[in-house]
Image (cartoon, rainbow, N blue to C red):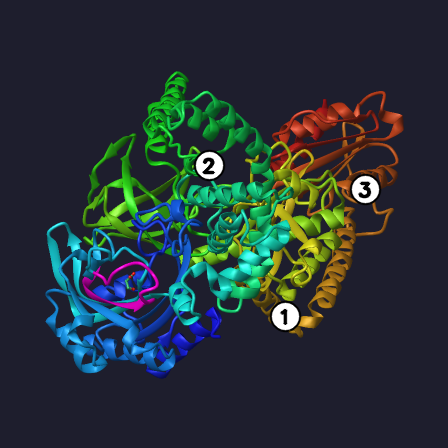
Amino acid sequence: MKTANDIRATFLDYFAKNGHQVVDSSPLVPRNDPTLMFTNAGMVQFKNVFTGAETRPYSRAATSQKCVRAGGKHNDLDNVGYTARHHTFFEMLGNFSFGDYFKDQAIELAWNLITKEFGLPADKLTVTVHTSDEEAAGLWRRIAGLPDERIIRIPTDDNFWRMGDTGPCGPCSEIFYDHGPAVAGGPPGSADADGDRFIEIWNLVFMQFEQRGPDDLVPLPKPSIDTGMGLERLAAVLQGRHDNYDIDLMRSLILASADATSSAPDGPHAVSHRVIADHLRSCSFLIADGVLPSNEGRGYVLRRIMRRAMRHAHMIGARDPLMHRLVPALITQMGDAYPELTRARALIVETLKLEETRFKQTLERGLRLLEEEEARLDAGRALPGDVAFKLYDTYGFPLDLTQDVLRGRGRGVDEAGFKAAMDEQRRKAREAWAGSGEAATERLWFELRDELGATEFFGYDTEVAEGKVTALVRGDARVEQAGIGDQVFVIVNQTPFYAESGGQVGDTGVIFSPGGAEVVVTDTLKKLGAVWAHAGTVTKGTLKVGDVVELRVDGERRGAIRANHSATHLLHKALQDRLGEHVTQKGSLVAPDRLRFDISQPTPLAPADVEEIEKVVNARILANSEVVTRLMSPDEARAMGAMALFGEKYGDEVRVVSMGGPHGDLQRDYSIELCGGTHVRRTGDIGLFKVVSEGAVAAGVRRIEALTGKGAFAWLEQRDHLLTEAASALKVAPAEVPARVAALVEERRKLERELAELRRQVAMGGGGPQSGGGAREVNGVKFLARVAEGLPAKDLKPMADDLKKQVESGVVAVIAVNDGKASVVVGVTDDLTGRFSAVDLVRTAAEALGGKGGGGRPDMAQAGGPDGARANDAVAALEAVLAG
Ligand code: SER
């Protein structure tokens, strides 16, 4: 038997042999189409290649594409579990030609694959073509040899495939497998076509047009091919099954569910096992592609699917959370074909476990309430909307979960009543806000938040994506369009731009509209924690609300920010390890050119601390371990030892980023932090880490600034230049610079000492200690004054003492002039202190020097003055005092 994995491989090998590039499945959340909730066909990732807006290095491709149909236009959720062919998640096998081959070769390739490689008997196959497409009918006759009665012309849109209201489209031809007369149903186009006998397995679309608007159909640059074949359906046919849930892949998941709950796979809980098998796939793949459960948008669709599965697990009687225990079975089946599943294993397991643990707390009580309410209702009467709303609001029951519970009992829900209750709650919230007296701009953001919902952020795994402009804000008013020179906030439904938060700066980049508008984004802000506001200036064209735009983050800048953010986490941990548990984060800035980290720490970091921290962080960088993101409850995160900001309010679920530990060992990771920022994939991407400053910012708070990657390298390079320059100026090798500088400093100190001594000697009269030369008799008192340049002030008193000894009886003065300023010391020998006070005299001198005051004892006093040039005036002033 060919397993589903064999069939997928055969399909891709076959097209590879026929000159096709095998391309990976694109993510479930389309980056290139903001109007699509989830990728729902193989052609989604090639949409712009068909229209010619994008070129690829190949013109033929083949894929096995992950698809989800839930929540959006194609919503299969309600039927899943109850029917043979509904899935929320399925794989679409497809081959594509971008202006390469067209109808004839597409038909030939398809026919040969299913009849020769897969060996399906030709007489079991029937095809349809669009009534207008005689060419295709002729090709089926010629290439496949099909008789005319098995080439059915369909006049309706069933055979004209459209992506949506806009996008590439064209007539199509479908291949049906006939399960034989034992199954009820008729051929396509017949009255009982809806029966299960003829099953469509492959759709070949002859892409010829692009729908640009309601009445705007233009030809594609080149006719192209897009085919899609559901792997599950094909596998059912090839494995001789009639039900997609009986193929090996689905069966193994059903058995895993049965096994984990000790219940029979085909017993009374058969539907629940099928629901769980299907939902396990959609939930796990969505989580792997970055969707996390939330109360809005895609996250809410995921939550609805998860909770639907969890209700079925509850019905089977699973006491403990079940879904996460089935992930290994899924990875065994699909992990080889989709390695992203294996990579995201921890995130998937923890997200499922968290959601189920939490939902279990209200599920039972909600079901009890539902039963009580039902008991009051007449048979067949719909459940009142306010009850459904209470179940939603208080017990976390999505509307479709309540509907699913009631489905088996033949009861519906008053949906209009549910919506009215929901609107009423919103209205109250608005009123409460309006009453808070906030500024008009804040009210505007509140209205936008209410009306548009939260912006979806794609930036954890992409820097380019398409979004739809949902609002434009200029000043504090909404506008419908913005032209050249206008400064605006652009709001879109989804974006790869990171909005400033948690210390990480907002992204910059460009927004382009297909109509030629261009907005240069200089910052991105998050309003009310939910609405992304791209702040920018229109530099080209006119941007309008409703435009589908391409948002392009400045990737180089973001790369540098990522490196700095991850390095901040490593630094935080290294600081704690080195300095102690008291170290907590007091603030941080993660910018492209540097990182800044403030910590509670009373004393400066010693150079050895800084060195050790750099060494440790760089060792973690070099180990190049994976950076892992998980989602968990704040309590669980703390139990894991995650570092969180004290006093910070966290939501029900937090992102936990860990890095630097042994490969794959999540329990022993090095740094574990609560964080919503963007990070490198592996620590090696940080490149290099260098602390460039450490200092105080407030009492008990130290600030560390550091660089990473290219910035750190440039900084070190600059240092190296300085060293080289210094070495060349000193005429020594760089390694000898420190010794040479030390020697020079020592030499200089020695010379300074010698110079001071010489100056002192000069000041003292050039002769020996007894020379006493230059003393004058003023009014019978010996007066000796010295004025000298460059004498240290501390030398003045000893010099005055010396001079006093020289004159034996008299008044002495020493004035030193340094940098234009004067210091003066006056000494009076003991026998004269009755007549003259050194303190009075020095004040006189100080005054002459432009200063004031002075102090000391009657025999020795000191002062200073700013006007060193008037040193001689000071001497004259002293002499005048002595002269009386
Ligand atoms: N786009 C077509 C489909 O989804 C064929 O791949 O059916």
Q: Of the residues shown, which amino acid type is indicated by label 2?
A: Val
Q: Of the residues shown, which amino acid type is indicated by label 3?
A: Met
Quadrant where ligand 1 appears: bottom left
Query: In the image, is 409 to the left or to the right of 332?
Result: left
Q: Nearer the viewer, residue 827 or 566?
A: 566
Q: Of the residues shown, which amino acid type is indicated by label 1?
A: Ala
- The residue at label 1 has a CB less than 8 Å from ligand 1: no
Magenta part of the protein: which range?
Answer: 168-188
Query: In the image, is 2 to the left or to the right of 52?
Result: right
| Residue at point 13%, 59% (across, down) | 155
| Residue position marked by numbered label 2 in the rendering | 405
For the C terminus, give its image quadrant. top right
Q: Nearer the viewer, residue 727 or 802?
A: 727
**Residue 158 seen in the figure:** yes
Quadrant of residue 387 in the image? top left
User: Does label 3 or label 2 sit earlier along the sequence?
Assistant: 2
| Residue position marked by numbered label 1 in the rendering | 727
| Residue at point 28%, 72% (across, down) | 125
